[in-house]
Image (cartoon, helix red, strand yellow):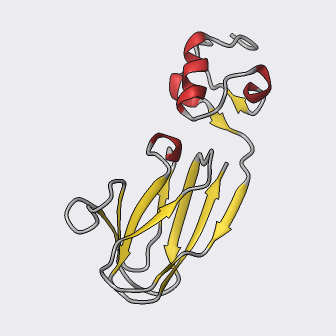
Amino acid sequence: MSGVLLERDYKNLAQLGIAPTAESWKRFVQIVNSNSEPIPVANVPLVLTPEITNPVLLLANTEYSIALPANTLKFKFKPRTVCRIRISYVAGETATNYFTVPLGAGFEEEYASLIGGTIYVQSTEANTILEMITYK
């Protein structure tokens, strides 16, 4: 199967927000099983471009929206101070339907292109600075 780009591979690239062209395909590797059959989830970017930002959450227990840069494939963040962070993918839900990032921990999303362009966060402490890296 080496060198063959299957229809489902084009769909996988499109789901990641990447135009499935011959050029974009060069950035991906395909993992195959012992029978040389492609494993569908294995289209993994080889080279990603990182961008660092430091959004500030001024008020405690207040929802803030963070717009992800266009074409973001992956992101991760951690607070500079020890606090809990709540994250949601829907506006208004960081107080009701959220994921809690534990004290001293960070958060990473491998499939950012599938969640839309904005995340919503709040901190248990005022003046929380997030150390955030997005990858394109």
Residue 59: quarter of image: bottom left
Residue under the image location 43 percent in, 79 percent down: 104
Residue under the image location 36 percent in, 74 percent down: 122
Task: Between residue 26 and residue 35, name the one nearer to us.
Answer: 26
Residue under the image location 70 percent in, 29 percent down: 29
Residue at the far left: name it.
96
Residue 33 in view, yes or no: no
Placement of 20 over or under 4, stated as above or below: below
The quarter in which the N terminus is drawn is top right
**Tally of marks:** 0
90 vs 47, left or right, is left
Q: List x then y, in percent, for residue 52.
A: 67, 67
Residue under the image location 54 percent in, 61 percent down: 76
Q: List x then y, in percent, for residue 56.
A: 51, 80
Q: List x then y, in percent, for residue 11.
A: 55, 20
Placement of 91 over or under 37, stated as above or below: below
Residue 82: quarter of image: bottom left
Residue 32: quarter of image: top right
Residue 60 in view, yes or no: yes
132 vs 28, left or right, is left
Q: List x then y, in percent, for residue 23.
A: 80, 26
107 vs 19, left or right, is left
Placement of 38 over or under 69, stated as above or below: above
Placement of 47 over or under 126, stated as above or below: above
